[in-house]
Amino acid sequence: MDDTLQLHVLDLEVPVLTGIYSEETHLPQPLRISVRVDLECPRRFASDTPLSASKNYMDLKHAATSALPEGQHFTLVEAVADHICETLFVQDRRVKRVSVDIVKVAIAEAGESIGISLTRHRP
C-alpha cells in the first residue's frame, strides 16, 4: 500500500453563479466549499523537508476560489466540484485523488448543510 498525504482546506465561503431556478441564475450564491487532496508523499518527513515534498495549501484554496471562471454560470454545483478537481489534477501530477464538498448556504432553513460531495481519482 502506498503512503498518502491528505491536505485539506475546509469551509471556504465562495460566491458562485449556480442554480437552475430563475431566482438563482442572476446573482452569485454563497457556497461553502471544502477540498481534500490525496498526494503522493515521501516515506518520511524530516524537520528540514522542503515544501516541494508536499503541496502549498493555497493551491487548494485557489482551485476553489479564484480559479473558478468569473461570470460563468454553473447549472449544477456538481460542475463546480468537477472544475475544482480538474484544476488540481492539472496543477500537480502528484495529486492522486480530490474530494470536494459543497454546501448551498442560501437554501438552509434551520442551519442544516444541504449539498454534495464529489470524489475524483486521477485518470
Image (cartoon, grey):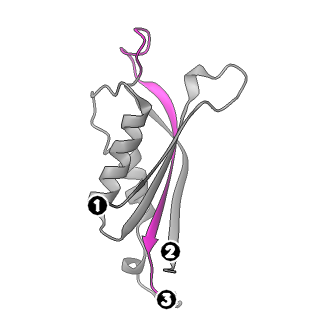
Decide: few, some or many residues near mark 1? Use Cα within 10 Å; few <14, some 14-19, many ≥20: few
Which sits earlier in the primary sequence, circle 2 or circle 3?
A: 2
Decide: few, some or many residues near mark 3? Use Cα within 10 Å; few <14, some 14-19, many ≥20: few
Q: Residue at x 31, y 51 (%)?
A: 86
What residue is disc 1 on? 91
Which sits earlier in the primary sequence, circle 3 or circle 1?
A: 3
**Magenta residues (range):** 19-43
Q: Secondary structure at mark 2?
A: strand
Q: Nearer the viewer, residue 47 or 86?
A: 86
Residue 49 in sight from this viewpoint: yes
Indicate the position of residue 119 as horizontal and vertical percent values.
47, 51
Q: Residue furthest top?
A: 22
Picture quadrant of residue 79: top left
Q: Residue at x 31, y 25 (%)?
A: 73
What residue is disc 2 on? 4
Q: Which mark is residue 43?
A: 3
Q: Is residue 38 above or below residue 62?
A: below
Indicate the position of residue 121 as horizontal and vertical percent values.
40, 58
Report the amino acid beneath label 3.
Arg
Decide: few, some or many residues near mark 2? Use Cα within 10 Å; few <14, some 14-19, many ≥20: some
Which label sits in the foreground, 3 or 1? 3
Give how far apart the Cα atoms at labels 1 and 2 are: 18 Å
> Quick check: is 12 in the magenta stretch?
no
Q: Quadrant of the C terminus?
A: bottom left
Indicate the position of residue 42 as horizontal and vertical percent values.
45, 85
Q: Secondary structure at mark 3?
A: loop
